[in-house]
Amino acid sequence: MPSARPLIAAAVVLVASSVASRAQDRVPFRAWVGMGLGAGPANIACNGCTSGWNLNGYTLLGSAGVMITPQLGIGLGLDQWVQSPEDSEATNTGTVLLHYYPIDRVGAFVEAGVGFSEGQARLNRSTTGARGDGLALMAAVGYDVRVLTVRGSDVNLTPRVSYVYSSIGDLRYEASRTPFATGWRHQVLSVGLEVSLGMRE
């Protein structure tokens, strides 16, 4: 009867090779940076305003950060939404965020952040607008789709859906003590696509 040792040795080599390959696949990127564009509605409300998800605009999306563990990272995010008819509103939101991959070696991620948001309103295409700022909360989901690897770094296309909420309070013109609006608060929902770079060691 032939010896089983060659078969056992071959199995060990195969398993070791598979484990090494998986370990290599699981090597996370150590930092990322991304920028993209999106579009979506906003719900802007204030005392005396007519609210509702009735404003559509475009969003500039951006994020950058470092990975703390293979699945958890910390970074900075930007969600800048702009509506541009004759009477226009805009929001600029910057947050400190957590970036988390729930499933190892899968590109799906969730984000949650807190920071500051600025609300703006401009009437009749004026060059100056009323402004105010306040605390902002952000949540997002997305998926990194690797399109190529360049010198050890992954270039990804990243579809992303984000939600921002901020309670601003008063919007004022710089030269006026009388508020343009009181009780200002906004919500922005944006669907966008980022190009991101995951930099590995």
Image (tube, rainbow, N blue to C red):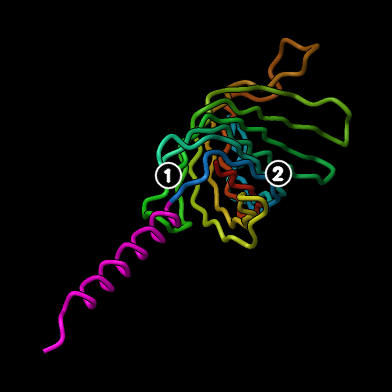
The magenta region covers 1-26
Q: Earlier in the sequence, mark 2 or mark 1?
A: 2
The residue that appears at 34% across and 60% down in the rendered structure is: 19
- Report the side of 62 relative to 8 (left or right): right
Which residue is tagged 1? 100
Quadrant of the image occupied by residue 157: bottom right
Q: Is residue 84 magenta?
A: no
Quadrant into which the N terminus falls: bottom left
Expressed as whole percent of the image width and height from the top left, the position of residue 162 reads 55, 47
Overall secondary structure of the magenta section:
helix
The residue that appears at 39% across and 60% down in the rendered structure is: 22
Quadrant of the image occupied by residue 63: top right
- Report the side of 150 relative to 67 (left or right): right
Q: Amino acid at mark 2?
A: Leu
The residue that appears at 37% across and 51% down in the rendered structure is: 102
Say few, some or many: other residues with alpha carbon within 10 Å of mark 2 (under 14 / 14 to 19 / 20 or more): some
Give the distance between the C-alpha atoms of the residues marked 2 and 1, in whole angstroms: 21 Å
In the image shown, does 115 or 196 lie closer to the viewer?
196
Which residue is tagged 2? 60
Expressed as whole percent of the image width and height from the top left, the position of residue 161 reads 55, 53
Secondary element under disc 2, as helix, strand or loop, is strand
Total tally of numbered discs in the picture: 2
Point out the frontmost of discs 2 and 1: 1
